[in-house]
Amino acid sequence: MNLYDKNGLVTWTAEEIQLREQVAQHFALRIPAILREMNPAWSLHRIESPLLTPTDLINPNYTVSDVWFQDEESDLVLRPETTPGSYVYAQHLLDTHSKVKPPFCCLAARQIVLA
């Protein structure tokens, strides 16, 4: 349901929220199982990055009219997508000697990063 008459600003009903959560849960369970069947070395990490994202991490093609900036002097924006947070977390896993090695997967809201 698009009550704001703007592209992408969806209002979800209780039934739609429940269905969305069920689909997310299904894939959160199935994807690891499928990947581990193909290669037992797979490790999966489900994350949720902050809603505010450093400006330098978002695609430079976004304009001021595309994203919400915290204020004129801030280097934070309301994240337009979850990809940057997933990449930062994946890099963190590789840089901290956490014994995580490719192949691994970071699952975020409606998006998956494979490494």
Image: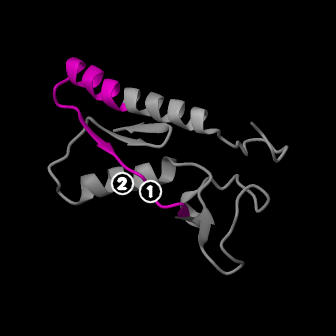
* Residue positioned 23% across, 18% down in the render: 38
Q: Residue at x 25, y 38 (%)?
A: 102
Q: Which mark sits nearer the N-terminus, 1 or 2?
A: 1
**Measured from the top left, where is residue 81 in percent x and y?**
58, 49
Q: Secondary structure at mark 2?
A: helix
**Residue 40 horizontal side relative to residue 92, left or right:** left
* Quadrant of residue 78 within the rendered picture: bottom right
The quarter in which the N terminus is drawn is top right
Label number found at residue 72: none
Residue 13, position as x, y percentages in the image: 64, 38
Residue named by callout 1: 49
- Residue projecting furthest to the front: 14
Whether label 1 touches label 2, CB < 8 Å: yes
Q: Residue at label 2?
A: 89
Which stretch did the figure color magenta?
28-52
Q: Residues within 10 Å of mark 1 (few under 14, many from 20)?
A: some
Q: Amino acid at mark 2?
A: Tyr
Q: Secondary structure at mark 1?
A: loop
Specify the amino acid type for callout 1. Answer: Ser
- x and y percentages locating residue 92 in the rendered image: 30, 57
Say above or below: 26 vs 83: above
Quarter assignment of residue 51: bottom right
